Image (cartoon, rainbow, N blue to C red):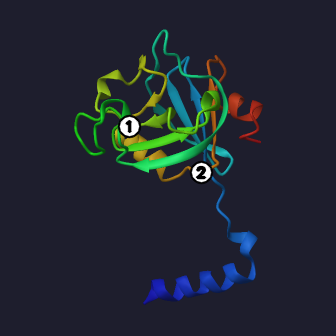
Amino acid sequence: MKWSFFLSIYVFFSALFPNQFLIEQADIIVNIKTNELALIEANHISEVFPIASGKKGEETPEGEFQVLVKAKQPYYRKKDIPGGDERNPLGSRWIGFDANGTSGRTYGVHGTNQPHSIGYHASLGCIRMENSAVEYVFERVEIGSKVVVVNDQRSFNALGKAYGLLK
């Protein structure tokens, strides 16, 4: 009963003041120098996760990108492996971004069936995370969220300010 009352109040006030209740979308900074990903929410670094990035010859593209695709239990097209299959190297989530003019289906942040690779330059250019970590990030980013990929010595705080993700 309490929750329905508060929900009714929220719906009433959000209809009166729609811009007052908007939640900022989360953004991502990936530092391939340190193999870490920072989740930026509400103008602060909310979490930092270890990742695996591209190996020599298959480096993760650097630059400023946008999330174009989100998928649960993604299908691995290269080897025809369905989502949810333990052989699927994409793990439980796919967050695809537009690196190198792609449509969000070539480069992405994704889970892995090889958690031992986290912390290394081991992927084919994508950003691997443990499945529980990518599921957390997946729930917070939206289509259009920024993905900044750098190879830099600066802290995430300095990088966030340099790329306009932190004030």
Quarter of the rendering containing residue 149: top right
Nearer-the-camera pick, 162 or 46 = 162
Q: Is residue 120 left or right of residue 97?
A: left
Identify the residue at the far left of this view.
86
Q: In screen coordinates, is 146 left or right of 59?
A: right
Quadrant where the image shows the C terminus: top right
Amino acid of disc 2: Ile
Q: Which class describes the residues within 10 Å of circle 2: few (<14), some (14-19), or many (20+)?
A: some
Residue topped by disc 1: 111
* Callout 1: SS: loop
Mark toward the start of the polypeptide (2 vs 1)? 1
Q: Residue at x 46, y 83 (%)?
A: 3
Quadrant position of residue 165: top right
Measuring from the top left, give residue 96's x and y in whole percent.
Answer: 52, 40
User: Picture coordinates of residue 12 (x, y %)?
Assistant: 65, 86
Label 2: state its secondary structure: loop
Q: Which residue is mark 2?
A: 143
Drawn side of residue 112 relative to residue 107, left or right = left
Q: Position of residue 53 (x, y in %)?
A: 47, 22
How many marks can you see?
Answer: 2
Residue 68 percent across, percent down from the top left:
58, 45
User: In percent of the image, x 52 and y 89: which residue is there?
Assistant: 5
In the rendered view, would you say 119 is above or below 66? Answer: above
Residue sitting at x 22%, y 38%? 86
75 relative to 126 in the view: left or right: left
State the separation of the CA atoms marked 2 and 1: 18 Å
Q: What residue is drawn where x is 75% and y is 70%?
A: 19
Tell me which amino acid carries mark 1.
Gly
Q: From the viewer's perspective, is the residue at label 2 or at label 1 nearer?
A: 2
Which residue is most to the top?
56
Please tell me whether residue 62 is drawn above or below residue 86 in the rendered image.
above
